[in-house]
Image (cartoon, rainbow, N blue to C red):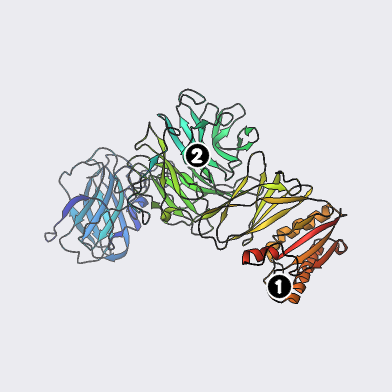
Amino acid sequence: MKNWFALLCLISLNAPAQTRWASQLLGVSSEYTPANGQQYKGTQALGRPNKMPQAESGASAWRPAQQDSDEQWIKVGFDTPAPVRQVVVAENFGAGCITKILAYDPQGKEYLLHQNNEATPKAVGRMWRVILKTPTSYPVAAIKLVLNTKKIAGWNEIDAIGVSVAAQPIEATINLAANLPQTLKKENLGPNVNSKANEVSPIISPDGKTIYFTRYDHPQNSKPSEDYDVWLSEEKNGAWQLSKNMGSPVNNGYQNSISYISPDDRTALLMNEYRPDGTLTKGVSISRKNQTGWTFPQALNLKNYANENAFSGFYIGPTGSVMVLSLQNQETIGDADLYVSFRQTDGSWSTPKNMGNTINTADAELTPFLATDNRTVYFTSNGRSGYGETDIFLSRRLDDSWANWSEPENLGAAINTTDFEGHFTIPASGAFAYFCSTENSLGEFDIFRLKLPETVQPVPTVLLQGSVIDQKTKQNVAAEVILEDLDQKLPPQKLDYDPAVGDFKLVLDTKKQYGLTAQRKGYQSAGTVLDLTKETKYRELRRDILLAPLEVGQKVSLSTILFEQSKFNLLPASTPELDRLAQLMIDNPKMEILLEGHTDNMGDFDANLQLSKDRVEEVKRYLATKNVPTDRVQTKGWGPTKPVSPNTSEDARKLNRRVDFTVLQM
């Protein structure tokens, strides 16, 4: 022991390549055990530090069962035994109580690396290292820390234990998102949105034109003090307008808060369940916008929902079929975890499923936001290395299990401060991020925005909006709008279009094909194919759908019926449109139609003429398999002789490759 020189110092933590973090818990004298979860257990000392460079108490660390007790110890193992020159210990809280560091070779022989019998400075938390004069002559397979917890009053917490063969100081880093510009700067949304009260929980509409938020203790709330109300502000000509209280029934004098708004601004998720008498209980409610305003919030049917935490969060993905939640129950890893729930065919939501320990820590994960790509989640955590009390992180889904996620990335110092940051929300464009913070606020919590770097934006999507129009009267008409993914066998998205409330809006993935259809009783369903296979950037797209009344002589284009290239074989993506036509003819037993096939002018004329005939005959055969009598379906192939668009480009030629039908009898 005389040949070893120990250098003791306080440092921050940046793990060099040679650093090995403890990977196995071999033993522990005791563990502080809260009601449930993995908080404060010995396993929390494994892996990289969860707090540093911020030294503060947290559940993602080992804590002995009692304060100021007798000798305590923890023993950890490393994946690959190797000589050691440096030992580093992340002491989150109650630092200075370690009296011995013991090392073990692969055979289990014990060595004393460091003994500290002198009083050490009392510190809330620190990164502490021991650097030896030379590396050990034996490979180190395990390390044991011995603590005298009576040396400093209060709790003692060990977050991480690392070793290295190098003398270069192990320094702490935050897992920052890549390529964050140094010039990033957040801006306050100003007095039309923020006030001297608290503005929190912002939710930006997917089109970026409306921001909803919760305002606490404001004189214009439902109650003059200690009340939470939902407010909104609209953006016009680049400026946020004076915010407005959403009023009753959303706001009722209790803790009212919004957590989600649908792409068309017609569906909102509200925190808590609204009882008929106006009081609230734990849960989540849904309210829908109609011609007269917002409906009374109805409880969302979320199976086996239970939350032991004071805070909760809910956000629904762009397809309306997936919800990400923040809650605490008996299966939670820590204080609050992120969960996922799936919409069922009966409209209920499945039992929440934990999203796994790549995202969740023994501390709290809160305020989840699922981006329009249905793959990128932004959330707040105090269980990871960061800048302050809580930071905002992002993680990307790696598969369809919703349990495998990329390592969360910190969004950097332009967003995160030494205090609380949370409630991150972005529009479909991904251009700006909105969140709440106290730094440089007008009062307490304010809402800020920041131009979001591409590296932390979600995968680009397309924002589609449109209306449904009566082809004859040119007036907007109410209808059911159906969006079908033509590349995958997924359930279609369905929504009710109400012209009195506004356009329908949907978020679509790039690099895909979709079928967009509208249907209404007394009309033939109509639609179009949206080919986004070449789209790589965000854009906004408008498609209005013309519905033709069902009457003799009416011609309708079946634009979502697709065939193999230069063949008459129907593609699977055609099935929904064909099934709707078959059902229409079954519902109208006297209906007879003429199917007409058309091609573009590329290639041999006679071949195109025959192809057009073969294709409508194939459609007729399909209808027959759905019990539509063949004598009610006539066919005619026109080849390239009746174009609806000049054959001057591929996009124009697509319009000419079509199947139409005309109503002959009703």
Rendered location of residue 379, percent (x, y): 44, 46
Q: Residue furthest top?
A: 224
Rendered location of residue 571, percent (x, y): 69, 66
Q: Which mark is residue 567?
A: 1
Amino acid type assigned to the residue bearing label 1 in the image: Lys
Rendered location of residue 160, percent (x, y): 31, 52
Amino acid type assigned to the residue bearing label 2 in the image: Glu
At x 71% / y 46%, what residue is drawn? 479
Contact between marks 1 and 2 (CB within 8 A): the answer is no
**Residues at marks 1 and 2, CA–CA distance in whole angstroms:** 50 Å
Residue 484 is left or right of residue 430, and the answer is: right
| Of marks 1 and 2, the one in the foreground | 2
**Label whose residue precedes the other's in the sequence (1 or 2):** 2
Which residue carries the number 2 mark? 235
Residue density around tag 1, few if under 14, some if 14–19, many if 20 or more, within 10 Å: few
At x 64% / y 61%, what residue is drawn? 486
Is the N terminus in the top left, top right, bottom left or bottom right quadrant? bottom left
| Closer-to-camera residue (182/610) | 610
Secondary structure state at the residue bearing disc 2: strand
